[in-house]
């Protein structure tokens, strides 16, 4: 299944490909050679998952996007000494403005050319050549590969960079640059001429999003305190005289370059790289700005509304073999589930589900998909989900359904903060209509096809597990038993046929309609127990909040109410019929009369009952182990 994130990026790329506004940069002659139709988008998560569309591998020169990374290198080399040479105040001026502090002569921030040239001069190195090696190695570490320079662009910048030469001499005059300002400036031209791709930019941005640890190599590139400073100036100064509007409309730390690149960073989640050479009047990529705007709006990415770690939304992951449904299966069903129940996967989700968290969950589901038949998303600890995240999750459910994998939800009954966004973002009537909420007290009448591409919720994990088990069993040609005789009961296994016939003669046949109450918790035991000949019943324990917990589901060959044989006087659980049920009802007095005459019957019954209780305890222990 293709990732919904990739599908989203493909649609976004297609829509914005028709945007023709803006012009390719011309103040550096070599940049005019860029194809104005180049357009790539790349997103990389903090754990290195990359989603790329369009011309994501087309190389271009990094230009001003180098500024935050060289500033980061200066911080790593000089620490607090950087603050005395370059400030952090937004200017509201263009990138090539001469914005210097009137008292100290220091540039106001490291994102304008004056501040960037200063940062280049602050990088550690005993000579300009040593400084260049340090810059090159640092940017290589951020990219995760060795970098190279476009020599033609470098020469073009150096031959036409008169304004930057004037800025460098002004910095020298103010004592901001030590040594030869022209040597520093040449290194600045070289760093701007480093070749990158859109994929590289996303990787660099993801490394900042990952608190300075490279998203792919796992190498620490920058310390957390320096990451914080770099992202701060990117957020307030990275888009030059568009920075205020950017903060208001997009709200993500970012940096643009005149070659058409933009990086954007969502701390703790992912990095974005965009490349499209046509620029607006402020020197920012027209398509690049629009990509970031739309992603911020569609995915609610503004840093002032985003919190948490994407990975934290996914808690325990376990299988249907570890936590089967509480139904008592027939022998053939038990054998099949023993072999295949591991293909049912539970994923326990936590907290508020935003796009980054859902992306992580979907990616984990994709990893599990080759060995999965059904997913159960346990929503008990989820506080809410954004519309954008719900849209991605709905798309994922549809995609998994296309691949034959069902996805169902459990424990979200009455949760408007989850249900409403999921319903709103269903793309068509068929999928919206596939929503079913299953109550634990009602018959489970769903076929295996319901929910495979739609939105299906269950009151509890047990109902969800049983639905998935039914679907799993449906792929085999084996048919579960639809009817049983009293001799088939596990509790009477080993009893002589003559005694079984006596009990059949003493019992009566009863039929209960689907949904009918058979027994009620709290009522007095009336001296009867029941053997299921056909259909299914649910054993329900009442909860303090008025709800119910299903502790078992019984089918043909199973018994209930048998605790009356051990002297129970008050019923501790209710019994509801899931389907039409036919039972044989035997009075305790009749059973005792027969077993008094034939003690072997009671001995056999008690041995089988003890074995059954042990099996149920073992099943309960498996549930506890799965949830621990």
Image (cartoon, helix red, strand yellow):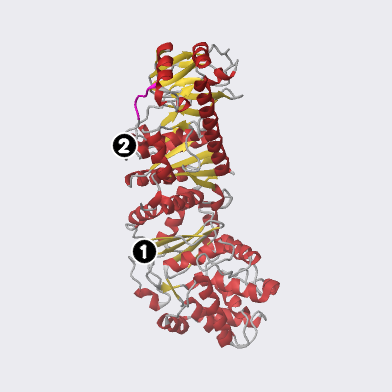
Give the percent coordinates (x, y) of residue 566.
58, 20
Residue 272 is tagged as none
Q: Measuring 34% from the left and 66% from the top, which residue is drawn there?
A: 38
- Residue 350 seen by the camera: no
Q: Measuring 57% from the left and 48% from the top, which residue is drawn there?
A: 305
Q: Which residues are magenta?
A: 481-485
Give the percent coordinates (x, y) of residue 349.
53, 44
Q: Tell us which disc is closer to us: 2 or 1.
A: 2
Give the percent coordinates (x, y) of residue 414.
51, 29
- Is the Cβ of the residue at disc 2 closer than 8 Å to that at disc 1? no
How many angstroms separate mark 2 from mark 1 (CA)? 54 Å
Lower sequence index among marks 2 and 1: 1
Secondary structure beneath disc 2? loop
Categorize mark 2 by other alpha carbons within 10 Å: few (<14), some (14-19), many (20+): few
Give the percent coordinates (x, y) of residue 68.
56, 69
Secondary structure beneath disc 1? loop
Instruction: Between residue 350 and residue 389, name the one nearer to us.
Output: 350
Instruction: Between residue 240 and residue 501, name the one nearer to us.
Output: 501
Q: Main secondary structure of the magenta part?
A: loop
Which corner quadrant holds the C terminus?
top right
The residue lying furthest to the left in this view is 477
Categorize mark 1 by other alpha carbons within 10 Å: few (<14), some (14-19), many (20+): many
Where does label 1 land, which residue? 39
Q: Quadrant of residue 580?
A: top left
Residue 478 is tagged as 2
Query: Is residue 482 on the magenta stretch?
Result: yes
> What is the tally of numbered marks visible in this picture?
2
Image height check: is 419 above or below 209? Answer: above
- Residue 289 seen by the camera: yes
Image height check: is 184 above or below 31? Answer: below
- Is residue 558 toward the left or the right of residue 185 in the image? left
Instruction: Between residue 623 and residue 301, name the one nearer to us.
Output: 623
């Amino acid at each position: 299944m293709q990732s919904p994130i990739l599908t989203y990026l493909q649609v976004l790329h297609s829509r914005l490909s028709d945007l023709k506004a803006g012009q390719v940069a011309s103040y550096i002659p070599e940049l005019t050679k860029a194809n104005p139709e180049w357009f790539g988008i790349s997103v990389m998560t903090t754990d290195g998952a990359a989603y790329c569309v369009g011309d994501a591998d087309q190389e271009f020169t990094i230009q001003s996007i180098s500024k935050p990374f060289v500033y980061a290198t200066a911080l790593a080399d000089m620490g607090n000494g950087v603050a005395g040479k370059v400030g952090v105040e937004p200017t509201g001026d263009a990138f090539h403005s001469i914005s210097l502090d009137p008292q100290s002569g220091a540039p106001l921030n490291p994102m304008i050319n004056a501040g960037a040239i200063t940062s280049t001069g602050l990088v550690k190195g005993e000579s300009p050549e040593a400084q260049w090696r340090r810059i090159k190695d640092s940017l290589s570490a951020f990219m995760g590969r060795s970098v190279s320079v476009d020599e033609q662009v470098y020469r073009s910048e150096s031959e036409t960079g008169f304004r930057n030469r004037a800025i460098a001499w002004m910095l020298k005059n103010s004592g901001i640059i030590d040594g030869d300002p022209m040597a520093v400036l040449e290194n600045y031209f070289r760093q701007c001429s480093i070749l990158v791709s859109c994929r590289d930019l996303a990787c660099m941005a993801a490394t900042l999003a990952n608190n300075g640890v490279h998203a792919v190599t796992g190498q620490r590139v920058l310390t957390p305190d320096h990451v914080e400073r770099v992202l701060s100036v990117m957020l307030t100064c990275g888009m030059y005289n568009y920075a205020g509007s950017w903060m208001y409309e997009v709200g993500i730390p970012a940096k643009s370059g005149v070659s058409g690149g933009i990086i954007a960073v969502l701390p703790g989640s992912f990095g974005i790289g965009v490349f499209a050479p046509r620029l607006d009047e402020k020197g920012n990529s027209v398509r690049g700005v629009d990509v970031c705007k739309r992603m911020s709006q569609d995915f609610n990415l503004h840093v002032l509304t985003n919190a948490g770690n994407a990975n934290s939304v996914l808690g325990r992951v376990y299988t249907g073999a570890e936590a089967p449904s509480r139904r008592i299966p027939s022998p053939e069903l038990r054998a099949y589930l023993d072999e295949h129940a591991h293909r049912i996967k539970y994923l326990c989700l936590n907290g508020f589900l935003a796009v980054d968290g859902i992306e992580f969950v979907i990616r984990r589901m994709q990893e599990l998909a080759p060995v999965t038949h059904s997913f159960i998303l346990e929503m008990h600890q989820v506080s809410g989900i954004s519309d954008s995240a719900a849209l991605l999750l709905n798309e994922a459910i549809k995609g998994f359904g296309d691949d034959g994998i069902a996805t169902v939800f459990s424990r979200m009954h009455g949760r408007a903060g989850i249900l409403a966004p999921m319903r709103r973002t269903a793309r068509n009537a068929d999928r919206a209509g596939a929503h079913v909420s299953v109550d634990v007290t009602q018959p489970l009448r769903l076929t295996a096809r319901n929910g495979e591409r739609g939105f299906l919720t269950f009151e509890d994990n047990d109902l969800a597990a049983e639905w998935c088990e039914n679907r799993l069993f449906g792929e085999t040609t084996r048919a579960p038993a639809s009817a049983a005789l009293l001799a088939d009961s596990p509790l009477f296994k080993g009893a002589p046929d003559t005694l079984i016939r006596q009990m059949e003669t003493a019992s009566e046949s009863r039929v209960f309609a689907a949904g009918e109450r058979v027994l009620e918790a709290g009522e007095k035991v009336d001296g009867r127990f029941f053997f299921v000949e056909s259909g299914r019943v649910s054993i329900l324990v009442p909860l303090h909040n008025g709800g119910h917990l299903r502790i078992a589901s019984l089918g043909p060959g199973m018994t209930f109410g048998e605790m009356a044989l051990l002297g129970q006087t008050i019923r501790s659980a209710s019994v509801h019929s899931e389907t039409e049920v036919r039972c044989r009802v035997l009075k305790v007095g009749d059973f005792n009369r027969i077993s008094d005459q034939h003690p072997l019957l009671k001995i056999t019954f008690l041995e089988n009952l003890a074995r059954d209780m042990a099996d149920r305890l073992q099943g309960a222990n498996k549930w506890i182990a799965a949830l621990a």
